[in-house]
Image: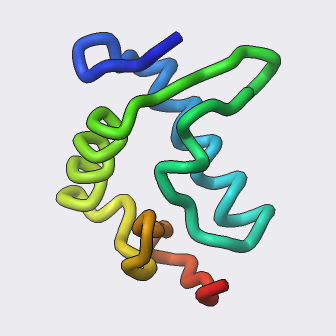
Amino acid sequence: MIVTDDSFSEQDSRCYEAKMKEIILIEHRPFSFADFREFEIGGEKYQMNDGTFRNNISKLRKTGEVELAFRSRPASYTIPTKKSARL
């Protein structure tokens, strides 16, 4: 499934949130667009294009749910309660 802004459902939102937390809390690193190009949760495959990722990250940054960890190519993000060391 390719997620666009129009089809970004509550279930999709929970899946992406779970993926973000998995990366930050289990893998102990910030996440970037590369982590969301294609991934699997619960046996279901997900994909996200870069524009949709940017739009969703922008919304999450405005609400304070995520913050910029550091700028690189690609930029990396984390949740405010968890700072990650730059790799």
Where residue 66 appears, as percent x and y from the top left, is 38, 63
Q: Residue at x 28, y 64 (%)?
A: 64
Q: Residue at x 41, y 19 (%)?
A: 3
Where residue 27 appears, as percent x and y from the top left, is 78, 65
Give the farthest residue toward the left: 62
Image-quadrant location for residue 40: top right
80 vs 58, left or right, is right
Give the farthest residue toward the front: 73
Q: Quadrant of the C terminus?
A: bottom right
Where residue 13 appears, as percent x and y from the top left, is 45, 30
How many labels were placed on the picture? 0
Q: How is the image coloured?
A: rainbow
Q: Give 65 or 35, whichever is nearer the viewer.
A: 35
85 vs 22, left or right, is left
Q: Give 29 or 38, whichever is nearer the viewer.
A: 38
Q: Residue at x 65, y 64 (%)?
A: 24
52 vs 44, left or right, is left
64 w.r.t. 82: above or below:
above
Q: Residue at x 47, y 50 (%)?
A: 33
87 w.r.t. 47: above or below:
below
Give the farthest residue toward the bottom: 85
Q: Give 46 or 50, whichever is nearer the viewer.
A: 50
Where residue 14 appears, as percent x and y from the top left, is 53, 31
